[in-house]
Amino acid sequence: MSNTTIQLSQEMKEKIASFGSKNETYEDILNRIYFLAVKEQLRRFLMSSEGCISIEEARKELNKEWPRSK
């Protein structure tokens, strides 16, 4: 893997460093932050109620399509 250089303000460098411990590299810190962000995005996606309907609404739709015989 090749390395690259990115420019950061001193303030941002210090903020990133504050997430690390003495023996961690910036790459270690950023990898950890990245994976935490991915987990958080997945959690928000899975827990989102967007596009969902209530159980009551689902039952009404089910009864419309599959009415119970009497």
Image (spheres, rainbow, N blue to C red):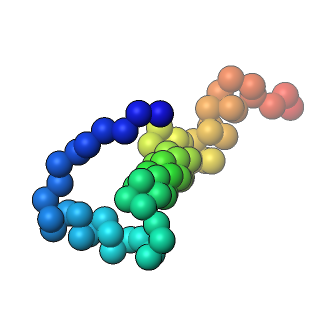
Where does residue 58 sit, x and y in percent of width and height? 62, 39
Where does residue 68 sit, x and y in percent of width and height? 81, 31
Residue 4 visible somewhere in the drawing: yes
Q: Classify the position of the C terminus by image quarter.
A: top right
Residue 43, placed above or below residue 68: below
Q: Residue furthest right?
A: 70
Which of 13 and 41 lies nearest the eye of the viewer? Answer: 13
Residue 19, placed above or below residue 40: below
Task: Tell me the quarter of the picture where residue 22 sits.
Answer: bottom left
Task: Tell me the quarter of the picture where residue 50 sits.
Answer: top left
Give the residue displayed 75% in from the left and 25% down from the top: 66
Give the residue displayed 13% in from the left and 59% down from the top: 9
Residue 33 visible somewhere in the drawing: no
Q: Residue furthest top?
A: 65
Which of 19 and 66 lies nearest the eye of the viewer? Answer: 19
Which of 39 and 53 lies nearest the eye of the viewer? Answer: 39
Task: Tell me the quarter of the picture where residue 12 sits.
Answer: bottom left
Give the residue displayed 41% in from the left and 33% down from the top: 2
Left or right of residue 63, residue 28 in this image: left
Give the residue displayed 46% in from the left and 66% down from the top: 24
Where does residue 33 sit, x and y in percent of width and height? 43, 58
Where does residue 60 sit, x and y in percent of width and height? 62, 37
Left or right of residue 27, residue 6 in this image: left
Residue 8, placed above or below residue 10: above
Residue 30, placed above or below residue 2: below
